[in-house]
Image (cartoon, coloured by chain):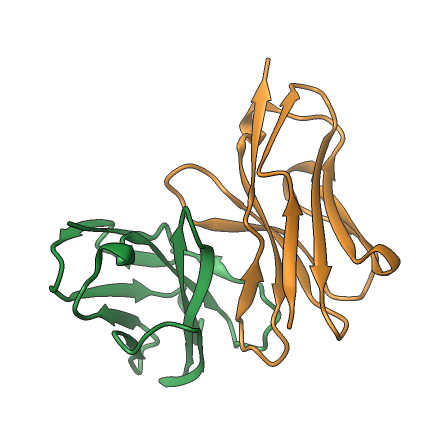
Chain colours: A orange, B green
Amino acid sequence: AQSVTQLGSHVSVSEGALVLLRCNYSSSVPPYLFWYVQYPNQGLQLLLKYTSAATLVKGINGFEAEFKKSETSFHLTKPSAHMSDAAEYFCAVSATGGYNKLIFGAGTRLAVHP
Amino acid sequence: KAGVTQTPRYLIKTRGQQVTLSCSPISGHRSVSWYQQTPGQGLQFLFEYFSETQRNKGNFPGRFSGRQFSNSRSEMNVSTLELGDSALYLCASSLDGTNTGELFFGEGSRLTVL
């Protein structure tokens, strides 16, 4: 069965510091992997997705993620955090044959302080 | 282009009642999926519809049901409400349901069961 593990339910960084949100997946077949962001009282917004075209994926708002098959990881990074990045971030894997069924990690709440 | 619209945004019900939530997808999108979000269980897949057909269903009891209309609008219904059904219910649409996982989410319907 496919699963996603996000390490760290809360991450706090200073404005301008590197953001690193960790995600490990379990999948028996090459997966589609995603990062979504949720701002307070809003739905989820797609940040980026991996579909096997390139291991380094660039997304919106300066975020990127690298697919590492050997480590079964898909960590999300941003070189310089901004106050507006404070939100909850979800890593997800697309279930095999699942017709848009995404399996989400538990989420990581990112706090950015001045 | 209008996004995914969910109504109502907030509602309060009592145990034993039933509730119907509505979702209007992005124009031209034919796949609609529903997710339940709670602090304890996180984001969980409920079901997915494409061209009025339910193609996939998550592990929820039969009290949870849905349907999709010919204009792609969707509704979900929860009967005999329980306290544990309190959650944010998110609807997401996608163009053709090819399991790319690129979902566009609404802002959700927040259900409180008293």
Eyeballing the image, is A55 above or below A77?
below
Left or right of B33 in this view: A29: right
Left or right of B114 in this view: B66: right
Residue B3 appears in view: no
Residue B55 falls in image quadrant: bottom left
Q: Position of residue B73 (x, y in %)?
A: 31, 72
Q: Position of residue B15 (x, y in %)?
A: 13, 59
Count of marks placed on residues: 0
Q: Position of residue B49 (x, y in %)?
A: 41, 78
Is A110 in front, or is B9?
A110
Q: Residue furthest right?
A: A70
Is B43 in front, or is B1?
B43
Q: Residue at x 72, y 26 (%)?
A: A80
Left or right of B20 in this view: A33: right
Quarter in which the N terminus of chain B is drawn: bottom left
Residue A93 appears in view: yes
Q: Residue at x 64, y 77 (%)?
A: A96
Residue B26 falls in image quadrant: bottom left
Q: Residue at x 27, y 71 (%)?
A: B75
Q: Position of residue A53 (x, y in %)?
A: 81, 65
Eyeballing the image, is A38 above or below B3?
above
